[in-house]
Amino acid sequence: MKRPFVFEEPEAMQQMTIRKLSTGLALVAAMTVQVATAQQDAGGPDPAAMPGAIKVLKDFPDWVTSVAYAPDGDSVAVGSYEQIQLFSAENLEPRKKLKVASGFARSMAFSPDGSLLAVGGYQSIDLWKTDDWSRAGTLKGHRGYVTGITFAADGSKLASSSEDARVLLWDVENQTSTLEFKELRTPIQSVAFSPDGKYLAYAVGDETLLSRAGAAKLINLETGEATAVEPAPEKAAMDVTFTSDSSKLLVGSMDEKVYAYTVDGKADGFFGGHSRPVNAVLVTAGDRLAISGSGGRFKKMNEVKFWNPTDGTEYATLDVHQAKVTDLALSPDGTRLLVASYDGTASVWDLQPLLEAAGLTETNDAEMDGEAAAATAATTLAQIITGDSRNAVAGEAKTIRVGVIGLDTSHSLAFTKVMNAENPDAAVAGCRVVAAYPHGSPDIESSVSRIPKYTEEIQKLDVKIVDSIDELLEQVDAVLLETNDGRPHLEQVLPVLKAGKPVFVDKPIAASLVDAIAIIEAAEHYGVPLFSSSSLRFMEAAQEVRSGKYGDVLGCDAYSPCSLEETHPDLYWYGIHGVETLFTVMGTGCEQVSRASTENFDVATGVWKDGRIGTFRGLRAGKTGYGGTAFCSKGIVALERFRGYGPLVESIVHFFKTGEAPVEQAETLEIYAFMTAADESKRQGGAPVRIEDVLSSARTEAHRKLVELKVLER
């Protein structure tokens, strides 16, 4: 049986882990149980649709962001926007509501003796006395949301993490902070004391920057020495927890893994069974059962997985929530699990049947080996939840069938050759182009001339040519929208979105800012993963700068060829490559753009809200190429080492497998708003044009267009 957990000697493990991360290889889960699909409304799963849940708690004002069990097992607390709701742990009937001082209850923890409940909101921590639920005080010192709270075993100290890149250590009795740990401008997502009180661990990562690596730190509280785990997670670290014997640290990450480290920071293995970012992790049953919750911005695969942290055996999967799982909590006896979700619900589960079937109770410890326990536990949980043991099937590596719309760009052939290679690289394995619709644009010469040749060439790669997008969608699981002309993209992408197929839209995403906004809003309306990008985003040096390798980015000058096409805004057709490079380095936050333009050159200058300046130079004469210069706090970096389409295809394959886009849609929109503002500045003789002004008018028109297309009702 192939298992999703990997163990090797530390040195070999580090090398292997780095190799796996660099290729994006997903390890196949050993055993998966899909729970009966919940209803698709935003209100979350319906209890009647999933009889395995003891109860689904609803009627919260917004996302459910944190959950906790009282140490005496008498009550549970559920956090949402500006409130905590308390329930009886026995019958789950509501008892009381507590007012959160500011914003969401992002984090929550009971003191070990149960006398206090600490709730982390925006810039503050509320302390509540549990005997009468009166407020015991408010801890102030953070400058962002408090993302994590943990009490020391004796209850005398409390540690908190925050978006402000700090961990604060508090004296609970005096309600004063006594120690501070800081990161460089990167949010800290979680914090945990080791049960023996010797270590404090925290997770570091910016979930809005998918290309930036995460980190986890271990603080020796006796010496004050900080140790970074190695190798670090590929993306933002989201949660940390210790095993009960304090010997291991588990770290959940946005790269869909749970990493295991020894307390000296060395890699000990990882669990790769998730298909979305891992947001919460805990360990129970004498460190023989790990439970991890995942999910991202899209519907589906918002999973809770049950697995053995010793050998990686996966027992079962719950996939019932309609948005990402944000937090997990166990009853003191370890028999009930409370799951929080962005779908505005919290579900409660009885774990006793799973524990017994997996041999994790005291009486059954020696009765089953790992693989037998996995099969039996999975079957048992499936029967409990769905009444049908046929749902317990071994996980298989399914090939994702990809369809191509548009054969008038070299990208169509290039991407297909990578995915359909006889022995594809591990990072692109699992996706295969099977069908193509060779649409083009009759009024663009390059489109007309390329289609016959590209159609012939792609058929040699075992790709079927179809006569319509509807026919294509019947045969594929995901779509590459490759039509070189951005004008028909909105029309072409709508049936894809209605069919629920994840889609990559090649540059330009559209031929107008209005259509770009409409495409992204339609994807959000239908709840379908979509992203768009130039391959220049994945230039090696640009990714290094974005990851923070050279410190803070202070400015950037990017350049690329900038040939013009009269059917498109000036920079959309080819200048997009250099503009995408600029935003890869600078990130979002551009406020205004001014442009100087001549027959052979363009220079568009953007001013960011923090005072930074970035420029794009478009080249139409002389020697052309792609690149630029990034000005960073630790050096001046040449933007170079473009390795072709490979890194983009790897990102597309990863996207098709997980539904997680490597580029935030807000950044994509700002790129096109930048280019639109540059055109407007040219019309105004080089005057500065505000990004928000062009976005505002385009949003209004995009909404009207979606209503006309009957995507939106009004």
Image (spheres, helix red, strand yellow):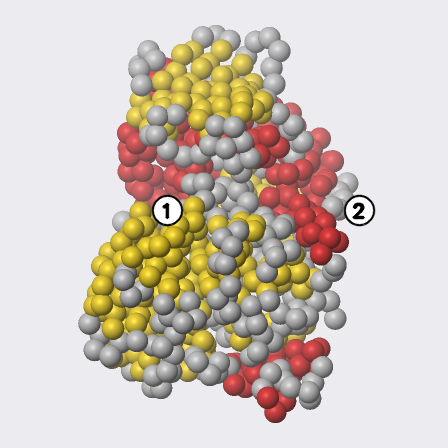
Residue 376 found in image quarter: bottom right
Provide residue 19's location: percent of width, then percent of height: 70, 48
Residue drawn 71% across the image and 41% down it: 418
Sequence-wise first label, 2 or 1 = 1
Please indicate whether residue 687 sits to the left or right of residue 218 in the image: left
Please indicate whether residue 127 sits to the left or right of residue 284 in the image: left
Kind of residue at badge 1: Asp
Residue identified by numbered label 2: 422
Residue drawn 42% across the image and 41% down it: 185
Looking at the rendered structure, which numbered label has been put on residue 249? Answer: none
Structural crowding at the residue carrying mark 2, measured as other residues with C-alpha within 10 Å and reported as few (<14), some (14–19) or many (≥20): few
Residue 143 vertical position relative to residue 595 in the rendered view, above or below: below
Residue 326 found in image quarter: bottom left
Residue drawn 64% across the image and 86% down it: 365
Q: How far apart are labels 2 and 1 at the CA level?
A: 48 Å
Res. 109 in view: no
Residue 274 vertical position relative to residue 335 in the rendered view, above or below: above
- Describe the element under mark 1 as helix, strand or loop: loop
Q: Residue furthest front?
A: 223
The one nearer the camera, 423 or 203, is 203
Provide residue 492's location: percent of width, then percent of height: 50, 42
Residue identified by numbered label 1: 164
The one nearer the camera, 184 or 273, is 184
